């Protein structure tokens, strides 16, 4: 449940205290989804209690985020409506995803496959990332950007076609409340 503890800390700035799920009833809808999403990732049974609840919340919010996905801890869903992520996409730690984001797969051509998104990436409203591309660490993807090319570390991406601007600490001030992992 460490992944949810990271998600919870990113949203609230507080440590998660497991109270046998009782506290989960009183969470905001985005954290409630993440709680049941992370639990159903652990349980792996298709029709477990948590799988059913995360599916109901997912449908209510219009989220296409599935428990089979590889997503690191510290996932932050800012305004979690209408987000679509292909199950083959892989995502690192401390990712911010906002309303209307699409992370999809290309089925043919040079970029056939799904994206790999590294740590500390901020993805703005209605951004689209498609194909077998790699998004580096500390990358900010601006709202409405269309990304179909690989992006190096420490960059800002905007526009269609994507324009990549190198920038140190690109997500400074945007990726907040990161839980420190003890050595």
Image (spheres, rainbow, N blue to C red):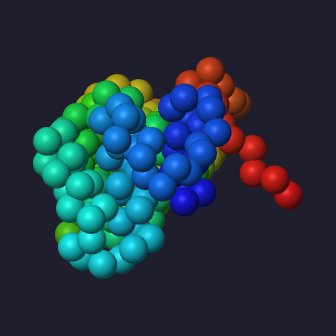
- Residue 137 x/y as whole percent: 61, 47
Q: Nearer the viewer, residue 68 or 60?
A: 60
Q: Nearer the viewer, residue 58 or 82?
A: 58
Query: In the figure, 94 relative to 92: above or below?
Result: above
Can residue 178 be seen here? The reply is yes
Residue farthest along the bottom direction in this orientation: 45
| Residue for point 52% across, 44% down | 7
- Residue 53 x/y as whole percent: 23, 55
Q: In the displayed structure, does residue 82 sit left or right of residue 145? A: left
Can residue 149 be seen here? The reply is no
- State the image quarter where residue 29 is shown: top left
- Residue 23 x/y as whole percent: 44, 42
| Residue for point 48% across, 55% down | 20
Query: In the figure, 138 relative to 149: above or below?
Result: above
What is the count of numbered marks? Answer: 0
* Quadrant of the image containing the C terminus: bottom right
| Residue for point 42% across, 59% down | 38
| Residue for point 65% across, 25% down | 172
- Residue 180 x/y as whole percent: 75, 44
Query: In the figure, 114 relative to 21: above or below?
Result: below
Residue farthest along the top direction in this orientation: 173
* Quadrant of the image containing the N terminus: bottom right
Residue farthest along the right direction in this orientation: 183
Query: In the figure, 48 relative to 9: above or below?
Result: below
Q: Nearer the viewer, residue 68 or 12?
A: 12
């Amino acid at each position: 449940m460490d992944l949810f503890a990271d998600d919870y800390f990113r949203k609230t700035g507080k440590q998660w205290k497991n109270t046998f799920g009782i506290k989960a009833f009183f969470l905001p809808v985005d954290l409630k989804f993440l709680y049941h999403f992370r639990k159903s990732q652990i349980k792996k049974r298709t029709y477990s209690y948590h799988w059913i609840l995360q599916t109901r919340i997912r449908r209510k919010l219009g989220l296409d985020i599935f428990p089979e996905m590889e997503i690191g801890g510290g996932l932050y869903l800012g305004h979690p409506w209408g987000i679509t992520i292909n199950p083959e996409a892989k995502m690192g730690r401390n990712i911010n995803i906002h309303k209307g984001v699409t992370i999809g797969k290309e089925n043919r051509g040079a970029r056939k496959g799904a994206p790999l998104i590294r740590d500390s990436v901020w993805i703005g409203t209605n951004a689209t990332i498609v194909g077998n591309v790699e998004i580096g660490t500390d990358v900010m993807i601006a709202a409405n950007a269309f990304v179909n090319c690989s992006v190096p570390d420490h960059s800002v991406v905007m526009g269609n076609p994507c324009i990549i601007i190198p920038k140190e600490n690109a997500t400074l001030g945007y990726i907040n409340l990161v839980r420190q992992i003890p050595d």
